[in-house]
Amino acid sequence: MFNDRSSPLSLLQTRRSGKPRDLIAPGPDEGQLRKILEVAQRTPDHGKLAPWRFVIVPLEKRDALAALLETAYRAEKPDAGRLEMESMRQFAHQAPTLVVALSAPVEGSKIPVWEQELSAGAAIMNLLHAAHALGFAAGWLTGWASYNEDVRAAFAKAGERIAGFVFIGTAGREQEERPRPEYDNIVSVWDR
């Protein structure tokens, strides 16, 4: 069982992202989404800078997002075929809830940008945990749309970057486990 909510530890041990293309309604309502984003803020944040932001893309704005993605993709890849363009539209319409997560480092801070970016990633992880704790499935995607300058400019302020698109909804099909790293391959004991 994935995202087992019987205890906090069980939830973490069974955490599994949902594939955004498989997420269906219902998604979180306004109050649940607010709670999810409030939990996302409770993340390690050296210097108390809050070097991240979240932009909610409501369902009624998904056509506008699809148009933005299609225009930006066509500008970058003028020879893109029909299937590539359809994938841009599908990306915008996945899942009932979409949150664009932004890395928003505070310039001039003594806290290195690297640490601020790690905090943004931790905030997104908390967002996923909160969504799962409320019984939803969620997935964090990056890819082409995260790195395109036109798409970035539509969501981010100067100096900010898209850290990912977080899709939230209900799993529309059985989730499958993915390979996980072997413990001994990622954990060692320092012995110098």
Image (tube, rainbow, N blue to C red):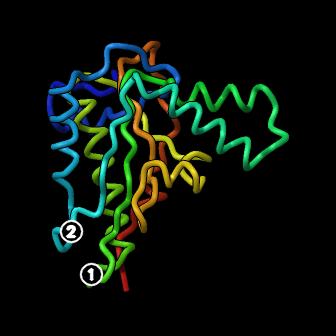
In this view, the residue in front, 67 or 185, is 67
* Residue 3 percent coordinates (x, y): 29, 28
Question: Callout 2: few (<14), some (14-19), or many (20+) C-alpha neighbours within 10 Å?
Answer: some
> Does 187 appear above or below 70?
below
Q: Residue at x 39, y 67 (%)?
A: 188
In this view, the residue in front, 102 or 183, is 102
Please, what is the three-letter code of the amino acid marked with disc 2?
Leu
**In the picture, which quadrant includes the C terminus?**
bottom left
* Residue 64 percent coordinates (x, y): 51, 31
Q: Residue at x 48, y 48 (%)?
A: 154
> Does 147 appear above or below 12?
below
SS at badge 2: loop
SS at badge 1: loop
Which numbered disc, 1 or 2, marks the residue that appears first in the sequence? 2
Q: Which mark is residue 49?
A: 2
Locate residue 175 relative to residue 6 in the image: left or right: right
Locate residue 164 relative to residue 53 in the image: left or right: right
Please, what is the three-letter code of the amino acid marked with disc 1?
Ser
Q: Residue at x 26, y 38 (%)?
A: 129
**In the picture, which quadrant includes the N terminus?**
top left
Q: What's the distance in space between the residues labelled 1 and 2, CA to CA?
A: 9 Å
Q: Is residue 51 visible?
A: yes
Q: Residue at x 33, y 34 (%)?
A: 15
* Residue 105 percent coordinates (x, y): 34, 69
* Residue 144 percent coordinates (x, y): 62, 47
Tell me whether circle 1 and circle 2 mark residues in contact (CB < 8 Å): yes
Q: Which mark is residue 127?
A: none
Residue highlighted by disc 1: 109
In this view, the residue in front, 93 or 40, is 93
